[in-house]
Image (spheres, helix red, strand yellow):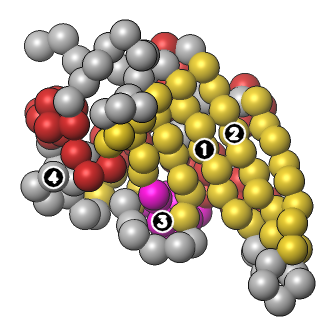
Amino acid sequence: MNFHNPDYVDISVHIHASESEKKVLKAIKNILPNNIDIVEFKVSRDVFRGHHGNPIVRLELKMRGRRKVREIYENIFKKLTGLRGGGWIKERFDDKKNKLYLRLDKQLAYLGEIRLTDGDDVIRVIFSFPGYDKIPGDQLEKEVNERFPSE
């Protein structure tokens, strides 16, 4: 079977005043394959004020390129746990924009576990597939389940 692969990834995270930026960067590094480093991404860093006036840093890491993005995609799905019931990809895939939206538990990522979550303290990962490569969400889910079976 010929599998669909993304060609762009956007990883973003909020770092609250009570968190160590160094530890959050380690959590991001833990979702990446060993051969890909954060310095290879286009990184933007914005600081804004939270509800109580505390500073919140928003880090966004972007990468384009089929080979490296595919490696990140494969690494995440090979190690992914949590929330993998029927429709789990379809409900996270926007077939109009050809984007897959994942929310990974930030605390567990720091500990080396890649787990889907619906919580707020997350690493957001958006995989974009080429525009010419229109994929129905249920097809992508079938591919992911076949290619990366859950434990």
Alpha carbons under labels 3 and 4: distance apart: 20 Å
- As drawn, the label of residue 105 is 3
Residues at circles 2 and 4 in contact by the CB criterion of under 8 Å:
no
Q: What residue sits 56% from the left and 57% below the top?
A: 123
x%, y% of residue 99? 41, 35
Question: Which secondary structure, mark 4?
Answer: loop
Callout 1, which amino acid? Ile
Q: Residue at x 11, y 13 (%)?
A: 1
- Of tags 3 and 4, the one toward the viewer is 4
The numbered disc on residue 61 is 2
Classify residue 132 as left or right of residue 57: left
Q: Are marks 3 and 1 in contact (CB under 8 Å)?
A: no
Cβ atoms at labels 1 and 4 below 8 Å apart: no
Gap between marks 3 and 2, in whole Å? 17 Å
Q: CA distance from mark 3 to mark 1?
A: 13 Å
Q: Is residue 116 above or below residue 74?
A: below
Mark 2 or mark 4, whichever is nearer to me: 4
Question: Of the residues shown, which amino acid type is indicated by label 4?
Answer: Gly
Q: Is 39 a magenta residue?
A: no
Q: Are marks 1 and 2 in contact (CB under 8 Å)?
A: yes
Neighbourhood count class around disc 2 (C-alpha, 10 Å): few under 14, some 14–19, many 20 upward: some
Ranked by sequence position, the earlier of labels 1 and 4 is: 1
Q: Which comes sooner in the sequence, label 1 or label 2?
A: 1
Residue type at numbered disc 3: Asp
Q: Is residue 110 magenta?
A: yes
Question: Mark on residue 87?
Answer: 4
The amino acid type found where label 2 is placed reads Leu
* Circle nearer the N terminus (3, 4): 4
